[in-house]
Image (cartoon, rainbow, N blue to C red):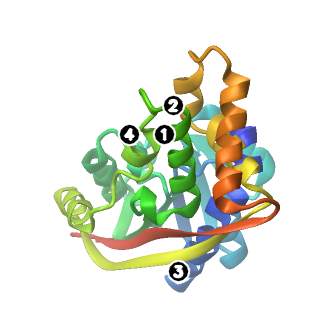
């Protein structure tokens, strides 16, 4: 999964937003940064490029992601870590960042409470969350392809998990409950560029939990080919682009 994620998804979905988030982080002039749900390091590399004198500790729950990320971006310190039980001392970081990871936390308030604990006084939490799946050109095309290929029992991972935490009111309430105060919320739409629609389909099918939901289908190769073709019909052949919308949050640790 990490290889497919890095090959087909990271360049298209995560690097455009990583540049934006790293620029915001650099403006805060942090000295010690903790990254949660770092994946294979798209944001990690952008942070180190934007703030070369900053110490970055990159973490992910998935050990395979950590191994891959550490090989791709050795300038950071990599640790396997659960965001709901961080293995770090109180007040050790000026800034905690997380790109498209909070949606996956089983108990977000508990994770946010851990963020507050490891932040120094006046420390800040900078993170992004995807908008509804309809606001993500590639995600919407993929979900439509799934619904056409599997009309009964269509996997709902995409709209329910990565695109299922979209209400700023709820996000703000969860942060407040954990002792963090939102200081800025901004909706950001950027363009994703992929080598082909089929490449994006491959990324979704092999680099996300959707792959597990499809394993029971008898002719998996034919199903994957049909989904890739549907996405190509929708997005076009060759190099393709699509808009992607997310919300960027900045929160501050309360005393």
Callout 2: SS: loop
The one nearer the camera, 240 or 131, is 240
Callout 1: SS: helix
Contact check, label 2 and label 1, Cβ < 8 Å: yes
- Marks 4 and 3, how far apart at CA: 26 Å
The numbered mark, 4 or 3, whose residue comes first in the sequence reads: 3
The one nearer the camera, 68 or 223, is 223
4 or 3: mark nearer the eye:
3
The residue that label 3 is drawn on is: 24
Residue count near mark 3 (Cα–Cα under 10 Å), binned few <14, some 14–19, many ≥20? some
Image point (72%, 54%), residue name? 197
Image point (67%, 78%), residue name? 50
- Marks 3 and 2, how far apart at CA: 41 Å
The residue that label 2 is drawn on is: 150
Q: Quadrant of the C terminus?
A: bottom left
Question: Image height check: is 1 above or below 38?
Answer: above
The numbered mark, 4 or 1, whose residue comes first in the sequence reads: 4
The numbered mark, 1 or 3, whose residue comes first in the sequence reads: 3
Q: Where is residue 121 in the image (x, y as percent from the top left)?
A: 32, 71
On the question of residue 95 being in view, the answer is yes
Q: Where is residue 168 in the image (x, y as percent from the top left)?
A: 27, 67
- Marks 2 and 4, how far apart at CA: 38 Å
The residue that label 1 is drawn on is: 147
- Marks 1 and 3, how far apart at CA: 37 Å
Callout 4: SS: loop
The numbered mark, 2 or 4, whose residue comes first in the sequence reads: 4
């Amino acid at each position: 999964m990490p290889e497919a994620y890095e090959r087909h998804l990271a360049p298209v979905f995560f690097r455009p937003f990583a540049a934006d988030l790293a620029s915001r982080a650099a403006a805060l002039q942090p000295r010690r940064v903790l990254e949660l749900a770092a994946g294979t390091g798209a944001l990690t590399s952008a942070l180190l490029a934007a703030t070369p004198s900053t110490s970055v500790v990159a973490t992910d729950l998935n050990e395979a992601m950590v191994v891959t990320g550490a090989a791709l971006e050795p300038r950071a310190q990599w640790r396997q870590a659960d965001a709901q039980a961080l293995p770090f001392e109180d007040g050790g970081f000026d800034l905690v960042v997380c790109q498209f990871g909070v949606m996956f936390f089983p108990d977000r308030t508990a994770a946010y409470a851990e963020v507050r604990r490891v932040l120094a006084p006046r420390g800040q939490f900078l993170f992004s969350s995807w908008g509804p799946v309809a606001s993500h050109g590639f995600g919407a095309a993929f979900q439509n392809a799934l619904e056409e290929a599997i009309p009964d029992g269509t996997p709902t991972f995409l709209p329910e998990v990565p695109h299922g935490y979209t209400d700023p009111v709820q996000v703000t309430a969860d942060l407040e409950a954990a002792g963090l105060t939102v200081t800025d919320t901004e909706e950001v739409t950027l363009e994703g560029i992929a080598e082909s629609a089929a490449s994006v389909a491959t990324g979704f099918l092999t680099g996300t939990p959707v792959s597990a939901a499809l394993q029971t289908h008898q002719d998996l190769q034919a199903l994957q080919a049909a989904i890739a073709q549907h996405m190509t019909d929708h997005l076009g052949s060759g190099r393709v682009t699509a808009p992607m919308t997310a919300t960027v949050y900045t929160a501050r640790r309360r005393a």
